[in-house]
Amino acid sequence: MEKKHFDMPLVLDSMQDSLLKAYNSWPIRLYIIHEDRVVYCGQQGPFGYNPADVDMTLEKLRGACRT
């Protein structure tokens, strides 16, 4: 992850599945957490992934953080 230079913090689950258990994210889901709140919870993956929704949510957050 360090080599990718993301503009925001990124969290990946551990091999012990602590995030899966905390957020009940089975089957696989995409989440966006901002200021300790879940602001986006995607549909079940991999077929329910909607990158456009993720992108739109991130853009809204980016705009809100600039003001």
Image (tube, grey):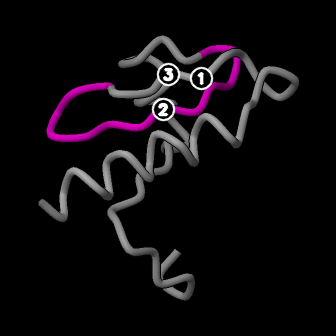
Q: Check residue 42 in the rendering and tell me which mark sits there, or answer none.
A: 1
Q: Residues within 10 Å of mark 1 (few under 14, many from 20)?
A: some
Q: Which residues are magenta?
A: 26-38
- Point out residue 1 in the picture as x, y percentages from the top left corner: 53, 74
State which quadrant residue 54 falls in.
Answer: top right
In front of the other: 15 or 30: 30
- Point out residue 11 in the picture as x, y percentages from the top left corner: 41, 52
Mark 1 and mark 2 in contact? Answer it, CB < 8 Å.
Answer: yes
39 lies left or right of 4: left
Mark 2 and mark 3 in contact? Answer it, CB < 8 Å.
Answer: yes
Q: Amino acid at mark 2?
A: Tyr
Query: In this figure, which residue is indicated by the disc labeled 3?
Result: 41
Q: CA distance from mark 3 to mark 1?
A: 4 Å
Q: CA distance from mark 1 to mark 2?
A: 6 Å
Q: CA distance from mark 2 to mark 3?
A: 5 Å
State whether residue 67 is above or below residue 38: below
Which residue is found at the position 44% from the left and 49% from the top?
58
Location of the C terminus (image quadrant): bottom left
Query: In this figure, which residue is indicated by the disc labeled 2?
Result: 31
Could you tell which of marks 2 and 3 lies nearer the N-terminus? Answer: 2
Which residue is found at the position 46% from the left and 40% from the top?
57
